[in-house]
């Protein structure tokens, strides 16, 4: 076993983890970490995929939004059955131009079954290890929540090289928030109302790059 920044991993696991995480994120200045408490960690049927996948359709819509900005990536933290946790690494800049949510779901299903597919990889990595590697890669941490500092009045808080953390169809588990806080996360809000994850990401991207709002108007998926 090797020791990787305080974590014991096999040499093979270290190689896969470092290559997939550090290599994939080296060219981006923002990454969205969407924590899905129900997202399945195994194959699922595409018919009726929303329920059967544990609401991975939310992750799929987030992928389509992240594609609007070439400098961003997405990490889906999947905590559902049968073998959690797993991290879905989406190299959005390498993905084809998805025209529908279903197309993204097909790619996710392949990745979960095979371990990788196209622009997506699936890793057996704990949430804390994930946050640790992002921290070691130079990302600041921003926890997106309803009760944080107003992002519209303090846009500097969402500028720079940042990992943004948010929930899926339900909020992030408290233990996950606690992990991010240990790495100095700032709690930032887009308002007191609960907003769909894909809309949160679109708003953050628009604050970082106003041209994103124009691109969104021609987005194939209705937001």
Image (cartoon, rainbow, N blue to C red):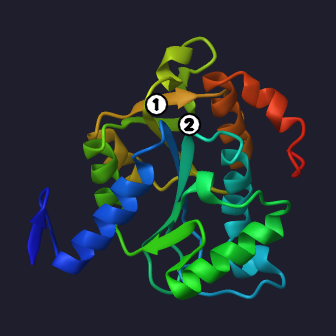
Q: In which quarter of the image is the C terminus?
A: top right
Seen in the image, is 59 located left or right of residue 187? Answer: right
Residue 106 rendering spot, x and y as whole percentages: 73, 77
Residue 221 tag number: none
Nearer the observer, 27 or 149: 27
Q: Are marks 2 and 1 in contact (CB under 8 Å)?
A: yes
* Residue found 82% across the figure and 37% down from its top: 216
Residue 96 rendering spot, x and y as whole percentages: 72, 61
Element under disc 1: strand
Look at the picture and state if 195 lies above or below 204: below
Seen in the image, is 149 located left or right of residue 186? Answer: right
Instruction: Name the residue tied to disc 2.
Output: 145
* Residue found 36% across the figure and 37% down from its top: 139
Nearer the observer, 14 or 43: 14
Nearer the observer, 85 or 17: 17
* Residue 38 sits in quarter: bottom right
* Residue 3 sits in quarter: bottom left
Element under disc 2: strand
Disc 2 to disc 1, C-alpha distance = 7 Å
Seen in the image, is 41 located left or right of residue 195? Answer: left
Q: Is residue 19 something that shows in the picture? A: yes
| Residue density around tag 2, few if under 14, some if 14–19, many if 20 or more, within 10 Å | many
Instruction: Name the residue tied to disc 1.
Output: 187
Residue 71 rendering spot, x and y as whole percentages: 56, 39
Look at the picture and state if 168 lies above or below 47: above
* Residue 39 sits in quarter: bottom right
Residue 109 rendering spot, x and y as whole percentages: 66, 80
């Amino acid at each position: 076993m090797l020791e990787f920044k305080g974590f014991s991993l096999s040499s093979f696991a270290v190689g896969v983890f470092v290559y997939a995480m550090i290599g994939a994120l080296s060219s981006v200045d923002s990454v969205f970490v969407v924590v899905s408490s129900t997202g399945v960690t195994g194959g699922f049927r595409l018919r009726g995929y929303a329920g059967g996948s544990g609401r991975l359709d939310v992750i799929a819509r987030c992928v389509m939004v992240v594609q609007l900005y070439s400098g961003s990536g997405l990490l889906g933290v999947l905590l559902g059955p049968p073998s959690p946790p797993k991290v879905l690494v989406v190299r959005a800049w390498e993905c084809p131009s998805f025209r529908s949510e279903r197309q993204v779901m097909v790619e996710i299903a392949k990745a979960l079954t095979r371990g990788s597919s196209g622009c997506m990889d699936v890793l057996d990595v704990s949430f804390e290890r994930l946050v640790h590697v992002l921290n070691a890669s130079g990302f600041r941490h921003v926890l997106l929540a309803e009760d944080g500092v107003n992002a519209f009045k303090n846009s500097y808080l969402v500028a720079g090289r940042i990992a943004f953390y948010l929930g899926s169809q339900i909020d992030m588990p408290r233990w996950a928030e606690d992990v991010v806080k240990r790495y100095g996360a700032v709690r930032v809000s887009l308002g007191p109302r609960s907003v769909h994850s894909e809309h949160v990401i679109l708003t953050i991207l628009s604050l970082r790059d106003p041209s994103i709002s124009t691109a969104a108007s021609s987005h194939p998926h209705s937001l």
